[in-house]
Image: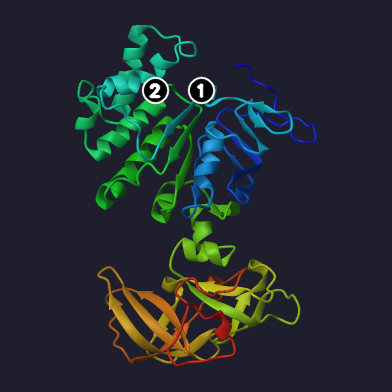
Amino acid sequence: MTALPLNDRDGSARPVRPGQLTVSNLEKGFASRQEVVQVIKDVSFTIEPGQFFTLLGPSGCGKTTTLRCIAGLEKADRGYIAAGGRVLADSETGRFVPASERDFGMVFQSYAIWPHMTVSQNVAFPLHANRRRHKLSRKEITDRVEEALAMVRLDQYGGRIATKLSGGQQQRLALARALITRPELLLLDEPLSNLDAGLRDHMRGELRAMQLRTGVTTLYVTHDQAEAFSMSDVIAVMDSGILVQQGAPREIYSRPATTFVATFVGRTNLLPVTRPPAQAGTGVVPVETSIGPILVDAERNRQIGPGDSIVIRPEDLQISTEAPRTGRANVFPGRVRRPIFLGENVELEIEIRGEILMSRQHPRFVFAAGDEVHVELPVDRCVVVSGAAAGVGSHVRAPGEHTGSDKNAAV
């Protein structure tokens, strides 16, 4: 297919890079009897060449529909999609390149392996099915199949019927078939979800190692935060059709932008802001919360307003049985409500002024229910996020306790 020049909507030339994917202002809805349900709402992102980019979100958030629009299996109602110098879809011009001409590799959740074919025949199928685009001799096809099978460590299984493979082997077979055409972009739709937990953990490492060896630009869709964190260069979190935050895995976890992101990517403590600072400040400023004033770094956080919350991860709480030195910020007296020994760590439910905060500590520390402790919330680990804390995270109200912010209590 002839490459078309890429231009921004204002007409200016956009630099073209092989393997780069650009998605702009993507929207997609599905009609029901009563209304049109918007599944994707103005989603935009760019995947750089060689990146492992993950769309992360709960079921129904629009991540798979986004991937299907990129693959050409769905036609977006609005938006622009381009890959490496080719405009694939543009609602303004009406251009739409069908899936068979996009030259992408794709692995479905179910693998979609042909049960009547051998492993080698499954891998070779894309080359035989589209001979017009892949004009290869029989020897060239055989060489490519052997190369792809060796890449996923299935070179000893070429003659075996595909259904005789284990779950992990079938997943690798689907990857080999997706890579046989040497695609510009690899699309993966929850490919590990059908594997048991142990094999899934192993295949995460295998998949990432394969992607690094080949250098193929990869778009991965999952609801599993562990998969996203362990494999991705960039994570884009989706909620109700909206891309709510995008960044490196460590940034997404430690600096969430909203309560949804904070609670979706791991357990956390959420403290509702009962009264924001009187005016925007710089440096460290006090913020009134449901457990009292907490100092936060205003320069590292968004402007604090009504309905916001302060997030701090359980592993960031510092616990001591001895009173800290005077002058320490964000130190509160608390009482251990319940210690939970989990082997690799100890989780503590700590009651502070009617709120329950979760703390995660090394298992060498021994606590008992009723222990009086001092809890420090390090200023640099307190993150202000948009949205109230109701109904999310590990923030809960202690039984029988009531404060002026009961309306924000989790259920």
The answer to whether residue 215 of the structure is visible from this angle is yes
Q: Earlier in the sequence, mark 1 or mark 2?
A: 1
In this rendering, the answer to whether 322 lies above or below 165 is below
User: Callout 1: 10 Å neighbours few (<14), some, many (20+)?
Assistant: few
Query: Which image quarter holds the N terminus?
Result: top right
Task: Check the image and name the residue furthest to the front.
Answer: 33
Q: Give the foreground label among 1 and 2.
A: 1
Quarter location, residue 119: top left
Q: Label 2 is placed on what type of residue?
A: Ile
Secondary structure beneath label 1: helix
Residue nearest the viewer, comparing 253 with 29: 29
Residue 341 is situated, as x and y percent measured from the top left of the image, at 27, 75
Q: Is residue 138 above or below residue 198?
A: above
For residue 173, side relative to residue 315 (left or right):
left
The CA span between labels 1 and 2 is 15 Å
At x 34% / y 76%, what residue is drawn? 347
Residue labelled with disc 1? 100
* Colour convention of the picture: rainbow
Q: Which residue is mark 2?
A: 180
The image quadrant that residue 22 belongs to is top right
